[in-house]
Amino acid sequence: MSAVTPTKANAGAPDPDGTAPASASAIFDSLDPANGDVVGTYPEHSADDVHRAVERAHEAAAWWSALSFDERGDLLTRWKGVITRRIAQLAHVVHQETGKPHADAQLEIALTVEHLSWAAGHAEKVLGRHRVNPGMMMANQAATVEYKPLGVIGVIGPWNYPVFTPMGSIGYALAAGNAVVFKPSEYTPGVGTWLADAFSEIVPDHPVFQVVTGHGETGAALAGSRVGKVAFTGSTRTGKLVMKAAAENLTPVIIEAGGKDALLVDEDADVAAAADAAVWGALSNAGQTCTGIERAYVHERVYDQFVAEVLRLAKDVRTGSDADAQIGPITMPSQLGVIQEHLSDAVARGGQALLGGADAVGDRYVQPTVLVDVPEDALAITDETFGPTLAIAKVPDMDEAVRRTNASRYGLGSSVFSKSRGAELASRIRSGMTSVNSVIAFAAIPSLPFGGVGDSGFGRIHGADGLKEFTFAKSVARQRMKPVLLLTSFTRSAKADGQLTQLLTMRHGGSSTLPKAGRRRRKKG
Ligand code: NDP
């Protein structure tokens, strides 16, 4: 890749760092959820600040989109290098603002770097101009398609994976040639600011990636601003508000919302591996994972063994904020009430807590909780709990497991443990992603699109789909030679009309002439 040095030209109103200047002096604190300490103070950007940031971003987008794929790729690679070399520093900010263990923060950043690398390295191949077959009727034309950037992308992110989740939009949007204005969660403004500051070290003179900080109003202003697309990650409820605000300007949106992911265990599964995956999928990050496992449907033949193994592993998972703790506090204090409500409701309806329970909810931490016999219409089964809880249900067969999994209004991720039927069961589950014989693996594979259906939202980040999400298709048909039949002219003859009819009958008049596109090899397994 060739190197490019950003110039002062077209710089608009360059900021000292990636944080957009604030007009007023309103500020807010970011707190450590483990103890309530103030770990940073950030501007509360107003609607005017947001609109000015978006205006500056449009100027920056003109410069950024005019670079070649190689030039952008070179700058993104340098940014990736800064993030990688300072991974401990960024992990510390993540730990302070979310409470998650350092090692988990580091894992999240490592996966982000892999994605950024993939997006930068694949943008040209996926989005660059390429020829497509014009078809027999238009054989005189050369047909090409390329994918052009939308301009400025507004990214609104959550706090639970404050690097990995928004960067699934930011990295791919930048690689596709867009500028970005990012509103991080009010719980993780420091992480968003860190990322933008690091970017502005590489691109100091053009506000290609800016951060606006604040509460819901700041996000609402971004959703209603003059951006080419809004990429929202957060709850389904807020996602609807974002869509409403964006509709005012006919701004397209991506909604990456919540989930209620299930893990299915078949009778021939490796039960120990399934239990290990279920415990990590449910409890890691204190259950505050959009694709976290909240339900398990287990074949009756292996149910007892699975429950015993889950309890054996889960009882040793330790909460805290010290170096040896495996799960941290609940980042958003209001979530404690939601978790408590789900656990109380489950027990009141006949569910049993084999570990933890409603008493496991403390002032800042929730202890690992394993429930069984919870009715399917209880909150712990129907709604996103977002805590370190797992509800396990016994099923007579895998048809029932699939039926119950698909009864959810959510459809984000899922996991299947089966030696012989993994791929088959995975394809029957109505969710955007499924891991077979592992958990959440799909999120770590940059070439796989990530996103949900139903109340989990729509649109895709990651992979080729994730790059295209931040572009529009530009199609060009270039006439290479005069057509044999000139059809798009008032000079068209009656003879040409007749020839067209004959040709059409030959091509499409039969009943067994389904034209097959080149088939991809189907994979077994
Ligand atoms: P929220 O929906 O509460 O907030 C998400 C973002 O939207 C925050 O930056 C928030 O700002 C902002 N916001 C709040 N109100 C508005 C508004 N009216 N207009 C525009 N933006 C607004 O979600 P959480 O931050 O609590 O994140 C947790 C949720 O995210 C869970 O449901 C989880 O499943 C989901 N999630 C989904 C993922 C996916 O890829 N599908 C990945 C990760 C999480 P502020 O914080 O300042 O209120």
Image: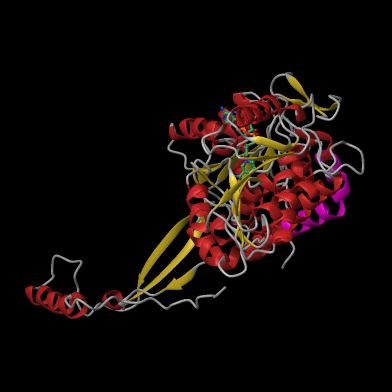
432 vs 494, left or right, is right
Q: Which residues are magenta?
A: 75-94
Q: Position of residue 492 (x, y in %)?
A: 13, 70
Relative to 84, residue 354 above or below: above
| Residue 515: % across, % down | 31, 76
Q: Residue at x 49, y 70 (%)?
A: 130
**Is 193 displayed left or right of 263 in the figure?**
right
The image quadrant that residue 120 belongs to is: bottom right
Using the image as rendered, state which of residue 151 and residue 292 is in the foreground: 292
Seen from the viewer's position, the closer of residues 119 and 377 is 377
Q: Position of residue 26 (x, y in %)?
A: 72, 18
Q: Quadrant of the N terminus?
A: bottom right
Question: Would you say residue 5 is visible in this rendering?
Answer: no
Which residue is at the far right?
Answer: 323
78 in magenta: yes
**Residue 224 image position (x, y, % from top left):** 51, 31
- In this rendering, is residue 86 above or below 70? above
